[in-house]
Amino acid sequence: MSLARIFSRAQVGVQAPEVIVEVHLGNGLPAFHIVGLPKASVKESKDRVRSALENSQFGFPDQRITVNLAPADLPKEGGRFDLAIAVGILVASGQINCPDIHRYEFYGELALNGEVRGVNAILPSVLGAKEQGRCCFLPAENDNLASLVSGVARKAVYSLQDVWNDLLNQQPLPLNICYPEQQSQRDTLLDLSDVKGQPGAKRVLEIAAAGGHNLLFLGPPGTGKSMLAQRMPTIMPTMSDDEAISTAALYSIIGQSVDLSNWRERPFRNPHHTCSAVALVGGSSNPKPGEISLAHNGVLFLDELPEFERKVLDSLREPMETGVVTISRAARQMEFPSQFQLIAALNPSPTGSHTDKRATPDQVLRYLSRVSGPFIDRIDLQIELPRLTSSQLQSTQVEESSEQVRARVERAYAIQLNRQGKVNARLNNKEMSIHCELAAAELQFLAKASEKLALSPRSYHRVIKVARTISDLKVQPAITLNELKEALNYRAFERLISQLTQY
């Protein structure tokens, strides 16, 4: 047989489109050509494949070899097609006779001695093979991570010789190797009990964790804003399998290893305020996920919020609403998930505190106006942290631990999933009319409050969602006036702005 068709997968963002590696051995002067829009790293596979075959004691055909990577209009890069090309040459030259070759997919980079090296973005490829019902031959160093995907057949390969032995039934490779379950160890260095005082801020943190709400801390330096934000993942509910795999897939794209002992922990990203819009949102000529996508299903913490460039902050507005970021370039368009939970922190004045008399109201307003109104509009919870007294700092009273708070959060989280299949912060208007219905008295109160506070329609709906989360924490089926009043109380930034504009 002088023609072989082998299945593999490319990497395009979080997608792994199918690539058919067609190998043809023809008459003519010996040559080796790869076509199908290969980049330099793919063209170089010719030399790797030739050396790997010869050093693995296989014959290299003395013919004209043409390798086509279909579809031809999809750019291919990296060494992930090496193994598929080598297997294609072996099948086309008759050194492997396997009628079921169409039921397998091959990924891996070849070393010159025939060993199979690991590749990036293995999870999207394995998920794609699962949809097609094919068995994966993948590098042994990637198999541990691939084992996170249940319901897919896979075989760990150390060398090209292993593939040959398996396909000819000489020495079959073990199917679906099981790895010992690694216990999840929550970071014991961070616990909510470390934060002294600030009961209001802890309450808001609990509401945000339970309902998936965005959160803003205002307060002078040293009031615990960063400490509270860093402890947010310790009280958030554990990720489901699907959430954890989608987050791990994003990290595998950029080549970062996933810690299998805490892969269900929600990510916490804390970019510096000098980062660019591309670093935050994602981009470059070959689009890569940015910080908001790496915080998918987790927390994005922006400290010193007014120090970020305004255009950088405003680039977050669409992803905060949609949970998806679309990066368009001349060559290609890519979509990355970005359902992150934002926690922002800022000092209410360039001097640290707006009450220290070191800055005029105009100077404070100029400083705060670096954060646009539409951006603040998308933050559900805003609270001002008071300066701690010396008695609070010296207090030896035992504070509530993260584990105690997380128990309440997980109970409210389970209520939301059973009721509507998602957290309250992601409800659309139609779902709100079903799950956040208000009685006549509550509607009248909210109408008066929104007129007095000049709430935008977006803020109006966000107040209702926060009230719904507070009700869930209390295990109440309906939203009452108490929950609405508490939700309206968490609009500290807007109150500060109106207070400053009265001077």
Image (tube, helix red, strand yellow):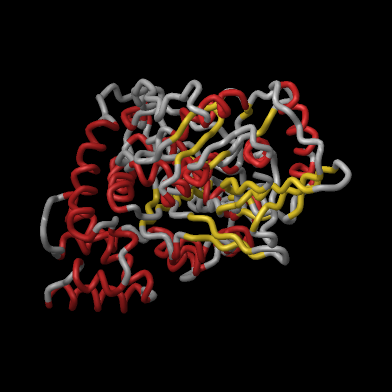
Along the line of sight, the residue nearer the viewer: 338 or 466: 338
**Quarter assignment of residue 74:** bottom right
Query: Horizontal and vertical percent for residue 305?
Result: 55, 52
Q: Does 271 sit left or right of 460 as displayed?
A: right
Q: Does 67 sit left or right of 214 as displayed?
A: right
Q: How many marks?
A: 0
**Quarter assignment of residue 180:** top left
Along the line of sight, the residue nearer the viewer: 488 or 359: 488
Query: Horizontal and vertical percent for residue 64?
Result: 81, 45
**Which residue is at a point 46% across and 24% down the rendered structure image?**
172
Query: Horizontal and vertical percent for residue 306?
Result: 58, 54
**Which residue is at a point 16% across and 60% down the rendered structure image?**
482
Report whether residue 249 is seen: no
Q: Residue lying furthest right in this view?
A: 29
Q: Does 439 sit left or right of 413 as displayed?
A: left
Along the line of sight, the residue nearer the viewer: 197 or 313: 313
Report whether residue 141 is seen: yes
Along the line of sight, the residue nearer the viewer: 64 or 340: 64
**Which residue is at a point 37% across and 25% down the rendered structure image?**
178
**Which residue is at a point 49% across and 69% down the rendered structure image?**
374
The quadrant in which the N terminus is found is top right
